[in-house]
Amino acid sequence: LTILEEFRANAEVGTKFVTVKSMIDYEKTAELLQKKDYVSGCRTLLRLHRGLDFTRDFLRKLSELNPEDKTSEACKVSYQETLAPYHTFLIRKGAGIAMAYGLPPRDELLSKVCKDVKSSIEALPEMLKYTDEVYNRIQVLYTSNDLLALP
């Protein structure tokens, strides 16, 4: 986020980073996506986009668990389906260990993040609706501009 915020605050290029579409158009037109020494807004947002995909998938699975169910298996499945293909072997193994030993049961996890577990579970469907909308809009833009495979 800091990278994108810095682009927005930059007097020279800030107007090019007002929307996702304007950022994509600017970086493609200026051929910045091929530059090795350029920190790309498109590449940065793609990483955040992938993180959102993992988060929304994990939260969807979390909402289907019972209060005492372990969250680690749901997290592992979400990770395998979303982020793992973009990570090296060592990162995948490290993430697997962290998930297996670092995640508590559903309600314990939610109580650490939210004040009221019950209202958090009730709010998940609506929150997921909005995260799906954001994810799908970005996915369409990146797909139509052939940017999903940025390194």
Image (tube, rainbow, N blue to C red):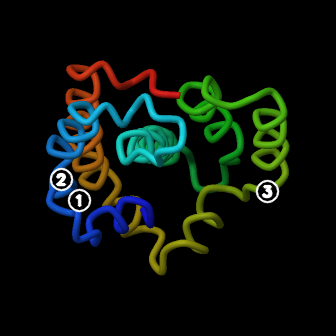
CA distance separating discs 2 and 1: 5 Å
Three-letter code, disc 1: Val
- The residue carrying pointer 2 sits among few (fewer than 14), some (14 to 19) or many (20 or more) residues within 10 Å by Cα, namely some
Look at the image and tell me in which quarter the N terminus lies.
Answer: bottom left
Residue lying furthest bottom: 115
In front here: 135 or 141?
141
- In the image, taking residue 73 as reference, residue 64 lies left or right, namely left
State which mark lies toward you, 3 or 2: 2
Q: Where is residue 144 in the image (x, y as percent from the top left)?
A: 20, 20
Picture disc at residue 16: 2
CA distance separating discs 3 and 2: 41 Å
Residue ID at (58%, 33%): 83
* Nearer-N-terminus badge (3/2): 2
Corner quadrant of residue 142: top left
- Label 3, secondary structure: give it: helix
Q: Mark 3 points at which residue?
A: 102
In this view, 144 is above or below 9: above
C-beta proximity under 8 Å, tags 2 and 1: yes
- Label 2, secondary structure: give it: helix
Three-letter code, disc 2: Lys
Three-letter code, disc 3: Gly
- Label 1, secondary structure: give it: loop
Q: Where is residue 26 in the image (x, y as percent from the top left)?
A: 20, 41
